[in-house]
Image (tube, grey):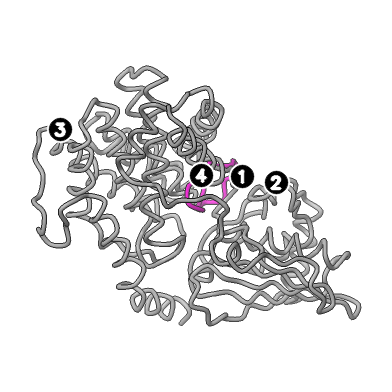
Amino acid sequence: MDMLEKELQDEFIRIIREELVPAMGCTEPIALAYAAARGREALGCEPERIVARCSGNMIKNVRCVTIPNSGGLTGIETACILGALAGDASAGMEVLEKVGEAERLRAGELLKKGCCKVEFLDSEIPLHFIIELSASGHTAEVEVRHTHTNVVLVTQDGKVIFEKTRELADRGYSTDRSKLTLETIKSFADEVDLALIRDIYERQIRYNMDIAYEGISGDYGIGIGRVIRGSYADGVVTRMKAFAAAASEARMGGCDMPVIINSGSGNQGIASSVPVIVYAREKNIPTEKLYRSLAFSSLLTIYQKEFIGKLSAFCGAVSASCASAAAITYMAGGTLSQIKATIDNTLANIPGIICDGAKISCAAKIASSLDASMMAHYLAMQNKEYEAYTGILKEDAGETISCVGYIGKVGMHQTDKEIIKMMLE
């Protein structure tokens, strides 16, 4: 690799390391717990009162999911109280890993007392919240913007003790995503020295398949994984859908096993990896090719989400499943034009799935999205592709991705407001 390519390789590895981190439970309540734990550190004692001011998308995504290690509880109040009582901020998105029975009981007492109050934060930033903790006349405040652990401001009794620069506060991450294109992603997947990324993907395979097996054998939600396996003809797509959906359902149903996330989402982490792993095992694909395909899928998911944002009215399962199927086209020896056809064929079909918050039915959206994206893959492998300007499709798959992203971020902005309004009513 020449110097530029080496720089590109290093930057893409930094992006993957920044995004593919472990998280326990749905990432929105975990983000609240993390911020509350940071606030507790600043306050220096157990809070008597917590005020959580949350953007509409945060409220939408926390409302229905079970919080891990909570004893089956849901809601913003639970997440904030558990984080403030027993959260370990140094554990990042695994902040609630060490919550024990004593803390659960204490959290129950504080919930009954109504010590945490939720207020609507009218913000143009979809992922935006401020946690304020107070006790004995002292206060601490933590503000998070754009990404789940992007703490931009911490105050103690009104004095700033931590503040991010404006640029970092508004970007939410430290890596440069500007060089991500389908061509550079494929070159990276083809050429990266696997020794530099092996540990990332060994961990992703272990974590995300462990929760998939737990979901398919355990008692979570409505047991979608087992129903898919028992009702559809046996085959690789049925298994891909069943295991990915089961992993999502376990995670949304309060399973305390960690998931390797992508673009701030466990469901996107699952949908962009589990189908690729199941397919590779079914087809006896060499491990080296699997790692390269997972790298392709990871970066393609991140690339798509750059145009949409972390939270929106657009279902992230679509982006991640599209990436999975494109990575399977790559794994199966497809050309760059066949990979692009897989993306176009998927986005010609299902870009309209709405996000109505995080909950167990996200698992069904993953299964449906995989159905569509694998149909797109099979069409592409036979050189069948919807033509440019069919609906929203553009001349190039990269342009199509940016247009779909614009629809998700800007076009569906009012849709998002209406969904949130309905849920709050």
Give the secondary structure at mark 1. loop
Residue that carries the numbered disc 3 in the rendered image: 381
The magenta segment: 251-264
Q: Earlier in the sequence, mark 4 or mark 3?
A: 4
Q: Earlier in the sequence, mark 4 or mark 2?
A: 4
Q: Quadrant of residue 244?
A: top left
Q: Nearer the viewer, residue 282 or 167?
A: 167
The image shows residue 202 at horizontal and vertical percentages of: 52, 27
Q: How many marks?
A: 4
The image shows residue 224 at horizontal and vertical percentages of: 37, 45
Real-space Cα separation, disc 4 to disc 2, in angstroms: 25 Å
Q: Earlier in the sequence, mark 4 or mark 1?
A: 4
- Residue furthest out toward the right: 136
Give the secondary structure at mark 4. helix
The image shows residue 231 at horizontal and vertical percentages of: 26, 38
Q: Earlier in the sequence, mark 3 or mark 2?
A: 2
Q: Nearer the viewer, residue 315 or 164?
A: 164
Residue that carries the numbered disc 2 in the rendered image: 97
Is mark 1 in CB contact (under 8 Å) with mark 2? yes
* Image quadrant where one finds the N terminus: top left
